[in-house]
Image (cartoon, grey):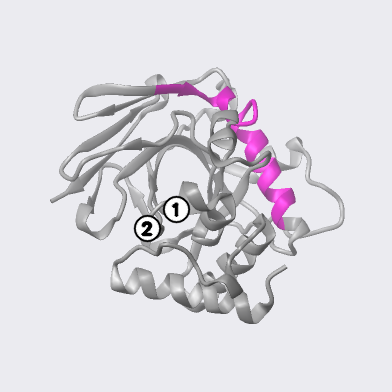
Amino acid sequence: MLSETAARTAAELLLKARGDHRRLDRLPPDCTPETVEDGMAIQNALADLWGLEVAGWKVGAASAAAMEMLGTDAPFPGRVFAPYLLDSPAGVAAEALHKCAVECEFAFWLGRDLPPRDADYGMDEIRDAVTDAYPAIELVNDYWVDGFALGVAHFVADNGSNGGLVLGPSIGDWRERDLAAAAATLSIDGEPTARGSGADVLGHPLNTLVWLANDLSRRGVGLQEGQVVTTGSMTGMTPCRPGATAVGDFGALGTVQVTFEL
């Protein structure tokens, strides 16, 4: 396990990379994350140093395909910072990102706190805590030259590769909808590029939220009223070019759009 000093050193390097708008080949040996726990220690230090309001959380590697790609057997958390929580249709500066990439996901708004505790949270409690559901696009961005060569702990350290979250319209009757069966099609400049369903993320998007609530609780962290949680990619990560517009079409549940502005 990384020491607090090592985690803070790694976080300082990642924060400086953000400020300098550059990518890192890797971290120095004395602060390289070897495990997801190491990665979370760095992510926590990064959030503390950066000082931005946490508007919510993301879940990475929630699908079997993502776990295989990242070489892990479980999801991982990342923070959604308030300045990067956007409403659709959104425009983001392409030059501000190292990677213009998108994923279609379901996101949930929490109407009450889910504090850390000894007992696990169950589905009924989690469902009751949610007030709204949304079609969403996660913006994927990281500060590694080749993160896949470094491994999942590095993605966790770099805030789970979250570059932002775009929310579509509220799904007013989401409790009556079968979100596991709900499909999403991702299009780039009008060309369909990927498709998936809610069942692709741990069998149901709410299963992912249950996982996150319990994972954070075991870490002594609670989800809070007014936070949003995006529950993992249904469509896989799709790269975009600067100037492109990505649209997630969730059918009757709404659409969400982001343009990578030149």
Give the total number of marks visible in the rendering.
2
**Magenta span contains residue 106:** no
Q: Which residues are magenta?
A: 195-216
Whether pointer 1 and pointer 2 mark residues with C-beta atoms closer than 8 Å, the reply is yes
At 39% from the left and 47% from the top, the residue drawn is: 140
User: Which x, y percent locates residue 88?
Assistant: 30, 42
Considering the whole magenta stretch, tell me its main secondary structure: helix
Q: Residue furthest left?
A: 262
Look at the picture and state if 167 lies above or below 150.
above
Residue type at the position of mark 1? Asn
Pick whichever, 151 or 193, lies toward us: 151
At 74% from the left and 61% from the top, the residue drawn is: 219
User: Which x, y percent locates residue 149?
Assistant: 49, 49
Look at the picture and state if 24 lies above or below 58.
below
Distance Cα–Cα, label 1 vs label 2:
9 Å
Q: Residue furthest bottom?
A: 5
User: Which x, y percent locates residue 72?
Assistant: 64, 41
Q: Dot 1: within a 10 Å radius of its alpha carbon, few (fewer than 14), some, or many (20 or more) residues?
A: many
Instruction: Give the residue pinned by disc 2.
Output: 84
Q: Residue furthest top?
A: 181
Pick whichever, 215 or 82, lies toward us: 215
38 displayed left or right of 47: right
Which of the 4 image quarters holds residue 187?
A: top left
Pick whichever, 170 or 262, lies toward us: 262
Pick whichever, 6 or 81, lies toward us: 6
User: Which x, y percent locates residue 26?
Assistant: 47, 63
Instruction: Give the residue pinned by disc 1.
Output: 162
Residue type at the position of mark 2? Tyr
For the N terminus, the image quarter is: bottom right
Label 1 vs label 2, nearer the camera = 1
